[in-house]
Structure formats: C-alpha cells, structure tokens
Image (spheres, rainbow, N blue to C red):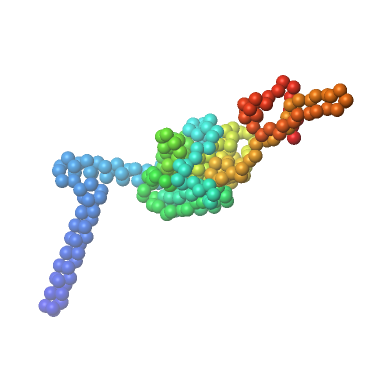
Amino acid sequence: MTQEQRAARKKQSILGGITTALVVAGCAFCIWKFALNSPTTAEEWREGFGRAVNNTKDNIGRLGDVLDNLDGFDWGNFFADDHWAGNTTVTLWKEKYINRENGGLILTLVNNLDDKWQSEFEVAVADWSESDALTLTVKKGSFDKGCERSEGVMTVCNDNFGETGWVGINENEVEQGSNRIISSVAKMNEYYLRNANFYHRRFTMCHEIGHGFGLPHTDENPYNKNQGNCMDYTDDPEENLLPGEVNFVKLSEVYLAQPEVKEPVRRRLLRRVEKDNGNVIETVALVVNEDKFDAWGLKDTYYRDVRM
C-alpha cells in the first residue's frame, strides 16, 4: 500500500468516526430531549428513564397479548356492562356544530387508527354519510396520538385496552349547563378485535361512531330478532352492519330544521238549540289550541268533540 493510499484510508476512517459520533450525539440528544424530558438533575434522569421504560412496555402491549380469535365467545355478553344501556334519548352536539338549514351536524372525524382498521373506518363513515343530517369530514391523524381527545371533533382510535369485557366504547364529553356534546372518542379494543373477523370489527366501528353522534341504542336485547341496524344489541353482528333508517330518522329530527306542523284542528259543537219551528241552530268552533280555547271562556257544558 502506497503512502497516498494509507493517508486516504486514514482520512476516511477519521471522517467515518466523526460521522458516527455525530449520529450517536444526535440520538442521545433526542433521547434526552424527547424521551427523558430534558433532565438536568439526577432525580429527573431517574424519573425520565422510568417513564421511558413504562412507555416502551405500553407500546409493546398495544400489539401483543391479544386474543387469536373470538371463537367460543358469546357476542351478546359484550353488551352486559355497556355504559350507554338504558339511555333512550339522543344527546345533541353543541349548537355551533349544527346547521339545521344546510347539512345538519357538521363534524370532523380524526382518524387515529392503525393501517389494519382503515377499511372498517372508511366503510362506516360512508354508511353514516348517507344521512342528510350529517356532514362528515375525515382528518388523518396519527396512531401514535392514540385516543387523545380534542374539542369539536370525534377521535376514532384503536389500542389494546386489555380484557375489559368491552370490544368498543364511546366517550362523549358533555358540557355542563347546556348538556351538549363538545368532543367524542370512539375506541376499538384490540384485545378482542385485533384478530376478529371483518363483520365484528365493522359492526363495532359503526356502533361506536353512532354513539359519537349522540345516538342511543335502538334495542338492548341481544338475543331477540335483529333490527338490521348497528345500534341494535345483537349476538350476530353480520345482520346489523348498517346505520339503518331508524337512526337516520332520529338524526334528522334533532339536527335538521323540521317543517312546520300545524296543530290538529278539531270542530267543536258548542251549542245545539232547537227552535219552536223545528229549525236547529248549531254553534260550532274550529279549535286549534285546546288550552287557549278554554282560557277564552268559550267552553260550554253542552259541547262535544267531532274529530276531523
């Protein structure tokens, strides 16, 4: 090897060492800054390492320790501890998210799901978008952000929440005073659903997103006849995959302006008097509002209702 070759190799080795040192220093800085939270004291270093270890364990758990399948599980049992059970009313979103004349509920869904959940999410959003009372926009989030709540949107996420007894859950944040929804999080539990079939996953996605709009269940007996909508308790999700017309009607009733409905008109016979010549005089009123009618002092003991 010539002197020039030895010099070139030495130079290359030095440059390689400098590059390696810079990479190591950059990685160390990132760990110090982001993983350990910029510790400056020995106590902060210990706390930072403790958090980093716990976060690593949590992230490993997100993908590991899940059921191979749902064989042998009674799907109806998953509704046993549903916190929505017994609630039959629709909870509305705050009024600023509603345009009753054009679009109904205007809502953004933040997609924090991993790649394996994209098909179920896209199908569910498309199905719910068939409602005239919903105007939905999807914003791509990040799986790393998980189920982080944000005001004014519905976050849809998946994680391994463990053996909780629920396959999916929705948590709406309701503002005090107005009793209106201001944020929503729909969670898919990977412990049960990671290896479940498409129908179980699609039903769960449709169901929890439906709760995010404020909808209650349409039925809470999983063992009776299926109603064909995803807000119905079921032991066979494949039969209840779509939102269903019943839920579209509920959404329209609360999020869209309703046509003016006239109060029922009743013809009220107030008085019937027979004259000496055999003629009959009838006093008749068309009544729209019964309460106002009575308040006017027109109520008579000789009237009867004639329904139109």
* Left or right of residue 9, residue 205 in this image: right
Residue 29 is drawn in which quadrant?
A: bottom left
Q: Residue furthest right?
A: 277
**Frontmost residue, 260 versus 154:** 260
Residue for point 21% across, 57% down: 26
* Percent coordinates x, y for residue 19 in the rendering: 19, 64
Residue for point 47% across, 34% down: 165
- Which of the image's four quarters has the C terminus? top right
The answer to whether residue 304 is seen in the rendering is: no
Residue for point 53% across, 51% down: 102
Above or below for 76 versus 241? above
Residue for point 23% across, 53% down: 30
* Percent coordinates x, y for residue 37 in the rendering: 23, 47
**Frontmost residue, 93 versus 101:** 101
**Frontmost residue, 263 versus 21:** 263
Q: Residue furthest front?
A: 277
* Percent coordinates x, y for residue 296 in the rendering: 63, 27
